[in-house]
Amino acid sequence: MISLTIRSKQHEGDTMLHTRIKIDGKAKWINLQLPVNIKKWQEVSTSLQKQTNYLYKLGYSQKIADIEFAIKDLRQRNCLTEEAINEAIQNTVLVEKRERIKKQDDLKRYISDKQNKSVKTWIKDYIAKIESGEARTYDGKRYAANTIRIWKQFLRIFLNFCKTTNDFCWEQINQSLANKYMSYLEEEGFAKSVADRYINCFKTLIIIAEREDIHDNYKAKGMFRHASVKEHEMTTAIYLTKDELEGLYNMELDGLDEEVRDAFLVACYTGQRHSDFSQLKTSCFDTIFDGRVVIKKVQTKTTTQVVIPILDNKLKNILEKYNYKVPEITDQVMNRHLKSIGKKLSHTVKSLGKDVQTILTKDEREAEAKKKKIFRYDEDGNVIKYKWELIVTHTGRRTCATNMYLSKKYTTREMMLVTGHKKEENFMKYIKLGLDEEAHKLAMLSDGEMF
């Protein structure tokens, strides 16, 4: 057995065992990389038996024997160098430590891989990146505030869904899981149009994760079908007629009601979303070659550039009233005040007080179930509301599109240049004609002869 000793001048703590080996005629101290307690070693070094027992308890006996064997082997092969001895010690003494480190690294990698494969974990992280601006749209733009709000709503719904199922990875997204997700949205009472939005959100994230090589489950995106949304299953979207707009424009209002009314009329005469018309300011207005004032705006949601001429003198009057800076009022505040204003206006503009068949939103159904709010129904059991109850900020965009369409002054392309729509199919969804109006349109086209 090789002789063992310590070389520390300290009297407490730990130090390494050493041995002395003659290499090329010179004695060299070799660090065995085996720590021992200084006090304890001093106690046992007086007796070979105590020393042997102490080393055995530390688990060093076999390691020291292996080192001794390696040194003898190196000497027999004439390969005995300090570097070769140290390598042999490393391979003998540190093998367990290396295995332990490797197991820890493997465990960390396993946990990391599991988290990366967890759809829930990845989606939470990605939506956080959307909110911070680290994740961007396909063309490198930051997501609009309204879009971020929708992603956060989706995340809340998705996390609630995850509570109903075991945590799943990308490879486990199959038709069964997709059906379970779609059934969950139905059972939660979301309108089909809303459910369709949350289905699209999930599908979009699956595609993004695939594009970023997070998974290779190429079939996953095809598992989700769009909710088939029929007209009678949607909350009724209205528009205001020319007479209703005239009455609204001429109302005597003041304070916040006046600002809400004026901002809403800007939407009705420009066809812009709340995120766009509420942000109009002096820098958005320009004069073109013929001296006409136009609105130049990059739409927040789609980043589409629109150039909108001021087509109505009422819009011009409103803009001049505010020195071409539209009052900036939140969507929620506007919706609340618009209903109050609409109710007042219905006393003189009777069409705003007519009954309109619609459906209740999820929140409204819950409110009715808890008897917090009672809704009206017609004799066939359909939900009915006064027309003024259905006015929201987005009504302005529909009002613009529909009235331009009814005027027959503009081509579809010209109207789309105002609203910023790129597809005619999507633009036509904003044309909100009632059955009476459709019948009138057909009658006018017939000119007294059907064929």
Image: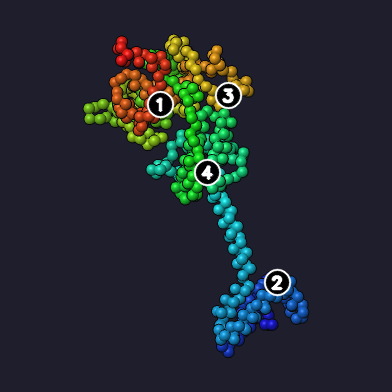
Q: Name the spot of residue 27 as percent of width and height, x first.
A: 60, 86
Q: Are marks 3 and 2 in contact (CB under 8 Å)?
A: no
Mark 3 vs mark 2, CA separation in Å = 71 Å
- Numbered tag placed on residue 123 in the rendering: 4
In this orientation, which residue lies closer to the viewer: 84 or 118? Answer: 118
Above/below status of 96 relative to 48: above
Type of the residue with mark 4? Ile
- Residue 436 in percent (x, y) is at 41, 14
Residue that carries the numbered disc 1 in the rendered image: 429
What whole-number distance in Å separates the C-alpha atoms at marks 1 and 2?
A: 79 Å
Residue at image position (29%, 23%) is: 410
Q: Position of residue 223 (x, y in %)?
A: 50, 40
Q: CA distance from mark 4 to mark 2?
A: 48 Å
Q: Give the amino acid at mark 3.
A: Arg
Residue 39 visible in image:
no
Q: Of marks 3 and 1, which one's residue comes earlier in the chain?
A: 3
| Left or right of 351 in this view: 49 | right
